Structures are given as C-alpha cells and as structure tokens.
Image (cartoon, coloured by chain):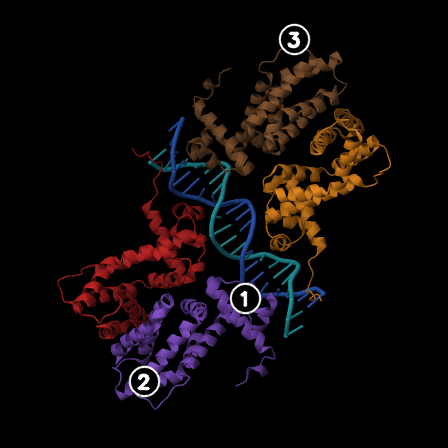
Chain colours: A brown, B orange, C red, D purple, E blue, F cyan
Amino acid sequence: MVKSMARPLSEEKRQAILESAINTMAELGLGAPTARIAKGAGVAEGTLFIYFPNKDALLNELYLELKREIAEEMLAGYRSDADHRTQWRHVWDRYIEWGAKHPARRKAMRQLVVSDRVLEQSRVAGARAFEDIQQLFDKSLSSGALREQPAAFLAGVMEAIAEVTLDFVARQPERMEEFKQLGFQAFWTGVA
Amino acid sequence: MVKSMARPLSEEKRQAILESAINTMAELGLGAPTARIAKGAGVAEGTLFIYFPNKDALLNELYLELKREIAEEMLAGYRSDADHRTQWRHVWDRYIEWGAKHPARRKAMRQLVVSDRVLEQSRVAGARAFEDIQQLFDKSLSSGALREQPAAFLAGVMEAIAEVTLDFVARQPERMEEFKQLGFQAFWTGVA
Amino acid sequence: MVKSMARPLSEEKRQAILESAINTMAELGLGAPTARIAKGAGVAEGTLFIYFPNKDALLNELYLELKREIAEEMLAGYRSDADHRTQWRHVWDRYIEWGAKHPARRKAMRQLVVSDRVLEQSRVAGARAFEDIQQLFDKSLSSGALREQPAAFLAGVMEAIAEVTLDFVARQPERMEEFKQLGFQAFWTGVA
Amino acid sequence: MVKSMARPLSEEKRQAILESAINTMAELGLGAPTARIAKGAGVAEGTLFIYFPNKDALLNELYLELKREIAEEMLAGYRSDADHRTQWRHVWDRYIEWGAKHPARRKAMRQLVVSDRVLEQSRVAGARAFEDIQQLFDKSLSSGALREQPAAFLAGVMEAIAEVTLDFVARQPERMEEFKQLGFQAFWTGVA
DNA sequence: TATGAATGAGTGTTCATTCAT
DNA sequence: CATGAATGAACACTCATTCAT
C-alpha cells in the first residue's frame, strides 16, 4: 500500500519531521515545541501542520511509526524453523540491540507510552504491527513451551524486563552482553 | 528559642497540595497547571509557592513522598522470620494491592518516573526509602535463594513485572488474584 | 539568494511598538506592561515578542532609537562654518525644541537613563550616535574656545542644564524662549 | 517637633526600614519588593506596613528623609559671614562629598526623583528643607553677586551640574578634587 | 506546497497587602 | 505591636495553530 497517492507530499519531509520530533522530545519531553521540531527538521513552522493536522496527530503517528520500526527490527533475520527458545532469544536480542543503538528513540517512546495523548486507537494499531510476534507467542503457548497464561501478559512481561535491561545497558554499555543474557534468563525461566 | 510564629506552615495544606497534584497530574500529566493544583487543594494560587518554591520542586517532593509511601506500604506487616519466598511474596502482594487501590497515584508516578524534571538527587533519595527492602534482596542473594545477579537489576525486574501486572489488574479488576499470582510466579521463577 | 518570506517583519509594526512603549512608559514608568504596550501598538501581546525577544531588549532598543533621534535632530540644519558659539547655540536650541515638542519621549528617556535595565553596551552604542556632536566639542576645546576640561564632562554639563531648562519649559511653556536663553547662557559662560 | 507622640513605634525600626529601602532600591530600583526591604531591615513583612501604610508612602517618606538629610549635610559648618562665593563653594563641596560617600543613597534618590510615585506634595515638602539654602540664593541674587534669574532655576542648574560631577567622581574616585573644582567652576561662572 | 509572521489563550511565578495568631 | 502565612490580581513570556503571501 503506497501512501503517496493519498498525500502527494514529500515523504522525505515527513520523515525529517518525525525524526526531529524524536530528538526534540528526547531532550524536552512531550512539551517539545512544534516550532523546534520543525526547525530541527529543516522546515518552516507551518509546514509541520501540512504533514500533520496537529501536534497530537504527530505524537500518535510517531508512536505508530516507532512501534512498526521496532517490530520490523525484531523480526529481521528471524528463522521460524528454530526451536522456541532460539526464536525468543532472537527476538529478545534484536530488541535489546535496537534499544541500545537508539537511545533517543527509546526516550521518546517512553514518554509516548505513558501519555494520555496517545489514543487507545493508536495503541491498538501499534499492537497490530506485532501480530507476527504475537503468533510466536501463541504457538509457543499452545505447544506447551510456555506456562499457561494470557499472551498479552507474556508480551508485557517481556517488554518490561527488556526495558529494565536497557536501562542497565544505557548506564554501563560495556556490560551489554551480560545484561542481555541476564534479562533473557529472567524472562525465559520466568515464563517458560 | 523559637520565634513564635504568626501562623505556622500547615502540614495539612502541604498534604492537600500534594494530594491535589496527584489527582490533577493523573488527569493532565506533568503539564497540570499549578493554578489547578492549588484550586484542587482549596488554596490560593500563590499559596502553592509558599509550600514549594516552584513547580519542579513540587514534582520532586511528590516523587519522594510517593516513593516513601510505597516503601512503607510494602513493609507493613512484614515478618523477617519467614522463609525467603514468603517474604518476597508479602512485599509483592502489598505493592500490587497498593497500586490497585491507588490508580491516580500510579498514574502520577508513571509520569514522574520518565520525566527529566525529577532529578537524579531525588531518585537517589527515593531509593534510600527502599533500603530495608534492599536488605531483603541482599540477604536472599547471599543466601543463594536467588540467582547471582546485581541486586538493583533484580529490583528493577520486580518493579517492571509488577507494573505490567497492575496494568492488567486495572483493566480487569475481577481477575486481580489471578494476575497477582501470575506476576509473582514470573518474577520468582525468573530470578530464583 | 534570499528565501522568499511569507510575510516580512513589518518595520511599521516595529515602530508602532516603540512608539507605544514611549507613551505607555511615559504614563506608567518602566513597569509599563508589555500587554498594554502591544495593545497601544495595535498588535497582539505575542507579536511584541516577535519584534523584541524580551522586555529588556525592547527597553534597550528604545533607548538607542531615542538617542539616535535626538542626535539627528540636534544636527539638522547645522552649519559647520559658523563660529563656535553659534554652532553650540544651534545644537542647544534644537535639543530644547525637541524636548519641548516631545514630552512623552523625554519622560520615557528619563526613566531609561536611570535604569539598570539599560545595559552599558547600549549606552556605549547610544554615545556613538553623538560622535558628530562630539567632534564639535573636541574642535571647540582644541581651538581654545572652551575652557580646558574632559569633553565628556562638558557634554554631561550641557545635557544636565538642558534637562533643567526643559523642566522649566514644561511648567511654563510660554516662557520657553526666556529659559532657552537663560539655560544656554549658564552653559556657555560656565564652560567657555 | 517630636514624632514619638504621634507614633509610639520604634523609631529604630522605622529607620532600619528606610535604610534597607535605600539599599534594596539601589540594587533593584523602585520595583524592590517590600518583603525584601523588610527582611533587610530585620523585621517581618507585615511590620513594614505598620510603619508605612503602603509602599508609595514609604517611597514618599524616603524621598523626604533623603532631602532633609542632604539639606542638613549641605549646611553643616556653614558660615554666613563669608563672602558669597565661599558660601556657595561650601554648600557645593558638602553636597559632592555627601554624594561621593553615599552611592546607594544617590542611586535610590535618582530613581525617586524621576518616578511618578513621588507626589508633588512630597516634592514641595522636600523643597522646604532647602529653605535656608534658598535664602542664600535669594541673598546672592539681590546682592547682585549672581546674574538675574529665577532662584529655582539656579538651584536646578546647580543640582544638575552636581549630579554630573558625582557621576564622574563615581567612575574615577581618585580625581574627585579635580571634578569637584571643575564642576563648581562651571556652575559659578555660569550663573554669577 | 511552503513559509513564517501573527494571534491570544494559557503558564509559572511575583508581590503588595491583609489578617489570624 | 509583631509576625509571616495567605491571597489573587498582574506580569512576562510561550506556543499550537492560522493564514496572508
């Protein structure tokens, strides 16, 4: 599905605005002024409102964009023929690596997640990007590889432990491998 | 010799302001206007600034206050003679119950935790309120009841899983016991 | 190549704001609210801050603008071939006439001159507008037409006597010529 | 005339408040907060309003107090049997010395003089403190020692030149004697 | 489409003054 | 009389959004 039909706008500029929003929000939180975001993107204040009807829309789209990016990243190189643990480990490692490599994205995401300005609708849409990973959960659950529990709960636990892990990696990057291992172990033995 | 005061600062009002800050911030996030917080506390706009020199100070004090409250709550009724698992379970249950009972407090806390406006200094001070619980971690670790790992990491994992658990409890309060159990199991088997 | 502007900053509006600042400050002193100044200029409150980054900047620019205007006024019609006394008298008369014609400007200037908010930097820049008049001082001094003394001191004395003169003119406008004469005599015999 | 009848208040405190007002206003201008003035005087915020009904009253009384102090200072050691020039020189020297010794007082006075908050009434009362000096003017004028001109104008010129002189003394205190002499000469030859 | 000047409601904070203690 | 907490109007400044160019 190509967007360029519906919006004959410069996809480049749109991306520049989203990227600037990430960096500006990482620094200033959700209160980051749209004027600064625009400036950071190299466009005029008003231009931002051509690409996004208002700030909340920008916030919600950014949330979605990041969700999609994370899901994509987590599945890259994924092999569905490996055993359950290996598959989980793959997904886990990819996420930790993404987070370690993109601190600003993580900071922005953290603000978005707890904000009321990101609508339920966006959260649902964001979850859809994780459908493939969801299937991994479902399969593992039905195969008995994981203890009986709601898949969403599982997902939440995994994400939560990953965040803690990333906090530690952020503070001591040189111990990344250790924390990555530690975090996965806590998750896997905890839920398996 | 203390100079007799015309009217001493009222601890009651201070609490009213903090309480109103919680509720207002639960609804509006950190952007909650000080004027609204004051109104909600039944005091004049200016009065807020007698009790807190500025909004950031209020935010930091609120963070601390909540941290202390949570620590106290978690330790209430705690028995140091029970076995490790029982002790952990106690602490876990108390936290889940606190969170389930105080959704506004949790919402406010969530915003504070991810905000740059809460200073490192306050976070350190907040951690001090958890020193007793920290000892529980240390003892369990040295006794071999828990797998070898940094105590702070353990604490982070526990808190993270608890938050997920509370999110589920918030959505389906009638399944509270089930989620409480599920969350603890994930934590305990994950780290033990 | 200049990027075509949507709407260029309007010199007209800038002047309107400065003009309104003069009148508002003449009435209310330096405490004149920016909101009132803006209103008096026929622009929105926020517009003032597009033309001046903050109130202090407005104050400093206003000081400069007035200094420049006064210098220009004093030199208009000036003939460098006349004798010293005539040249001085010309400059003197022009200033007294300017002050008598623009009481609000004088009132505003009086506040600005004694305020710490007008920076040394602005005062130096303001003095630069008087360089031509300064030369008149220097020439007269070196020619021996004026008693030996620092040129800046001379300038200060002249300005001070002019202010007194203007105060009297303000109270009894009908005696303007008399005071103008009296003041100049005090100055000229005092320094020549 | 003893004040302590009308106000059975501590004259000491009243003076402390006025003194603090001088210093605080020298630093912060007329916008100096009453709370800070009170603190500087070692009294409570509310106490200030026992001694002065409101801030404007404080300002006006301060103006008067300073006027009186200056007049008194100028006449101290004054010999009415000396010749005119000697008498004028005495008064001149005393004022320059007062100003050089009390920069904060001068700064405060400068703000008060140009402020609308000091009422005409206070200015008139302030002038009364100069009645004795006024007589000196009158006598000198009628004796023919000074050129024919309104006494008030003369006084204004003297004050104005003195202010300029003090500005120069403030910047180069080591040249005080030189400027004092220069200033007096400008004044005396200008008006005599 | 792109620009950035213009808008004005909204924000944190100050401060003269009052008044309960 | 003395205190300082309490008040709320006022202020400088910000910012999402609009719209003339």
Residue furthest out toward the bottom:
D81
Going from the N terminus, do you reach mark 1 or mark 2 first?
A: 1
The residue beneath circle 2 is D86
Asked which secondary structure carries label 2, the reply is helix
As drawn, A154 above or below A172: above
Which mark is nearer the camera, 3 or 1? 3
Query: What is the chain identity of the residue bearing mark 3?
Result: A
Label 3 with label 1: CB-CB less than 8 Å: no
Residue C171 appears in the figure: no
Query: What is the chain identity of the residue bearing mark 1?
Result: D
As drawn, B175 above or below A85: below
Residue B4: where, in percent of width, then height? 70, 66
Q: Which mark is residue D65?
A: none
Left or right, B15 with respect to D53, comes to right
Quick one: label 2, few (<14), some, or many (20+) residues within 10 Å? some
The residue beneath circle 1 is D37
Quarter placement of the C terminus of chain C: bottom left
As drawn, A153 above or below F1: above
Question: Label 2, label 3: how many angstroms apart (C-alpha)?
Answer: 113 Å
The residue beneath circle 3 is A81
Query: What is the chain identity of the residue bearing mark 2?
Result: D
Which mark is nearer the camera, 1 or 2? 2
As drawn, C189 above or below C82: below
Q: Quadrant of residue B44?
A: bottom right
Asked which secondary structure carries label 3, the reply is loop
Q: Nearer the viewer, residue A184 or C78?
A: A184
> Of the residues shown, which amino acid type is indicated by label 1?
Ile
